[in-house]
Image (cartoon, grey):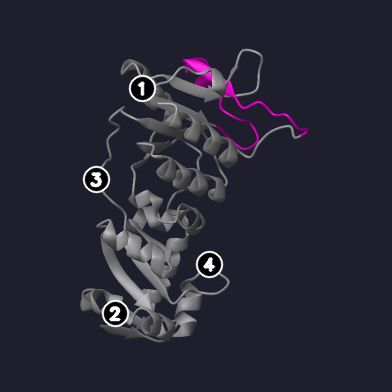
Amino acid sequence: MKEILSTKNATIKEFKKLHKKKYREELQQYIIEGFHLIEEAVKAGAEIDWILFNQRGKTEWSDWLGQQPSELLIYVSDEVLVSLSELPTPQGMTAIVKMPDDEKKIDFSGGWLLLDNVQDPGNVGTMIRTADAAGLAGVILGEGSSDIYSTKVLRAMQGSNYHLPVIRKPLAEAIDRFKEAKVPVYGTELNPEAVSYRELSNSKDYALIMGNEGQGVATEFLEKADQNIYIPIKGAAESLNVAIAAGILMYHLENNN
């Protein structure tokens, strides 16, 4: 087991770079914070490069740490953990994880959530977590959507990225593939040609497109969809938050199979 007590350590400086997407992609690593996410990553077989912990981490999770390969462990000072954290109060443990290099495949069975330029990290993470909870087969992130390896998205997903495929792929290509496989594609929008989600016929396999927080789903994708749907609003609100709307639609589609 290694020990690093200075924030000026060269290794720590390298780890801090992983808060920027540019360096995550260059180094093919990302940071996760807190015991729960690290435990989920280990359970899922993610490739862990390093586990860093301070005295709090050692005290609270000593048994678990004792089960991990000693060559992966780094004991750090509180100051080092604070310097690596984007949380107001670090949770005693941080890990450096290798990005998976295997290209996950779309099998076109079950429900798939497609995100078109969804930029808010909380929304992206919440929708992936909800897709996991609702029992969807996977999530596809189109261009412009928030990076799933940012710490805000990772916190919002709460480990759901280890439970189902999360694939980054151009949506035009993905939608064409679903249509070729005879899987119905549903866009979401508010216009007279859309139908209430309650009117959809049951389908075990489907692709549901959710769009940008301000602009919605791009016109080119709405035109490709087999049917565009909406959620009726009874109150005075103009629209729903995209993550809330996605949750309503995913649970409806899964429970009506």
Quadrant in the picture for the N terminus:
bottom left
Secondary element at image label 2: helix
The image shows residue 256 at horizontal and vertical percentages of 44, 27
The residue closer to the viewer here, 219 or 69, is 69
Q: Which residues are magenta?
A: 211-236
The image shows residue 239 at horizontal and vertical percentages of 69, 33
- Could you tell me how far apart the alpha carbons at marks 3 and 4 are, in whole angstroms? 28 Å
Mark in front: 4 vs 2 = 2
Secondary element at image label 3: loop
Q: Residue at the spot x=45%, y=44% of the render?
A: 128
- Vertical placement of 180 versus 36: above or below? above
Q: Residue at the spot x=44%, y=65% of the render?
A: 17
Of the two numbered discs 1 and 2 on the same chain, state the one appearing first in sequence: 2
Of the two numbered discs 2 and 3 on the same chain, state the one appearing first in sequence: 2
Amino acid of disc 4: Glu
Q: Which residue is mark 4?
A: 86
Question: Crowding at label 4, few (<14), some or many (≥20) Cα neighbours within 10 Å?
Answer: few
Tag on residue 178?
1
- Could you tell me how far apart the alpha carbons at marks 2 and 3 are, in whole angstroms? 32 Å
Q: Which residue is mark 3?
A: 102
